Amino acid sequence: MKPKVLITRPTPQNILARVGAGCEVDSNQEDRPLTRDEIMTRLDGCAGILCHLTDRIDSSVMERAPSLKVIANVAVGYDNIDVASATRLGIMVTNTPDVLTDTTADFAFALLLATARRLVEADQFVRTGQWKEWRFDLLLGTDVHHSTLGIIGLGRIGSAVARRGRGFGMKILYSMPQRADVEVERELGATYVDQATLLSESDFVSVHAPLKAETRHLIGARELALMKPSAILINTARGPVVDETALVEALQSGRIAGAGLDVFEQEPRVHPELVEFPNVVLAPHIASASRQTRLRMMEVAAENLIAGVCGGVPPNVVNREVAERNSKPA
Ligand code: GLV
């Protein structure tokens, strides 16, 4: 009998066919997320689930699905899944790293450039017929080239942003709990500093820390107060890493010069004050959203799902101890 799997969102036909070759597939074809109750009901008898970051898979969902072996998230982040409970229950959790690194870094840089050079304001200015004459002081922005870029979290995506910064002749600072290897620092031309130094010396601060208990509100009022009044904050990581209320206050008081945000504390709700600032560029969590990358993410998630339900070790298990435990002879 084929193992049963649930796919929570509409999925390209070739991926469905690939999964369907080895599994009995229950796939949500409606263009809306399944409710928690629907997920619980439809997980009945499933060995795997292919889900997205809007699907909250917590311990009670998992406990209702005793045959579940693998949760394949179509994202590099997996804060929507209670990994500790999954590990306790012997369920593998997988993500989709690497394939989205450059696409996400491109977008972080796009937000940085758009905010620094006031691209959205400029577009609005032209579209709304306000452009009456060329002016020397029209929509003055701030230079990106040869400025200082502070990267919080020099992982895969942070490193890819650093590479882009180097191309712009920027000085690269980084902070994170554990210093990177010397070779990595050399390749990226990145200097390790403590977070306070990074915040106070950078012209652009780009956040690339995963969301965990210890990174929630990593950037709050105290941290924003350390930034230069001319500095710009970029967040393509997860909304709750930045305290949105503190960010609004910092923007209101001119403590910082602007922000480029792809992620928010309570998506899809955006703090009502944020939409009022002309010096804030907003995007609806689309940093990895190129056609090519979203397809690759699906393919990787499907590979993880198939391997997990067929008794193999998926390529991208985040709780490897479960895979190791499962592969030990009894
Ligand atoms: C997107 O936010 C992801 O984690 O892949």
Image (cartoon, rainbow, N blue to C red):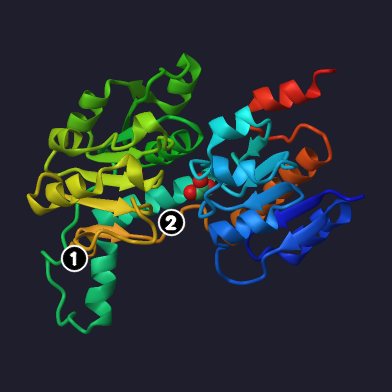
Position of residue 47 relative to residue 262, above or below, is above
Please tell me how crowded label 2 is: few (under 14), some (14-19), or many (20+) other residues with Cα within 10 Å.
some
Q: CA distance from mark 1 to mark 2?
A: 19 Å
Q: Quadrant location of residue 312?
A: top right
Is there any visible trace of residue 204 in the rendered image? yes
Q: Is mark 1 within 8 Å of ligand 1?
A: no
Q: Position of residue 271 (x, y in %)?
A: 25, 58
Whether label 1 touches label 2, CB < 8 Å: no
Position of residue 42 relative to residue 46, above or below, is below
Q: Is mark 2 within 8 Å of ligand 1?
A: yes
Q: Name the amino acid type tagged 2.
A: His
Give the left or right position of residue 22, taking residue 278 as reference: right
Find disc 1 in the rendering and name its residue: 276
Please tell me how crowded label 1 is: few (under 14), some (14-19), or many (20+) other residues with Cα within 10 Å.
few
Q: Assign a secondary structure to mark 2.
A: loop
Give the left or right position of residue 271, taking residue 85 as reference: left
Q: Name the amino acid type tagged 1.
A: Glu
At horizontal 66% and vertical 45% (from top left) the residue drawn is 72
Find disc 2 in the rendering and name its residue: 285
At horizontal 22% and vertical 38% (from top left) the residue drawn is 220
At horizontal 9% and vertical 49% (from top left) the residue drawn is 254
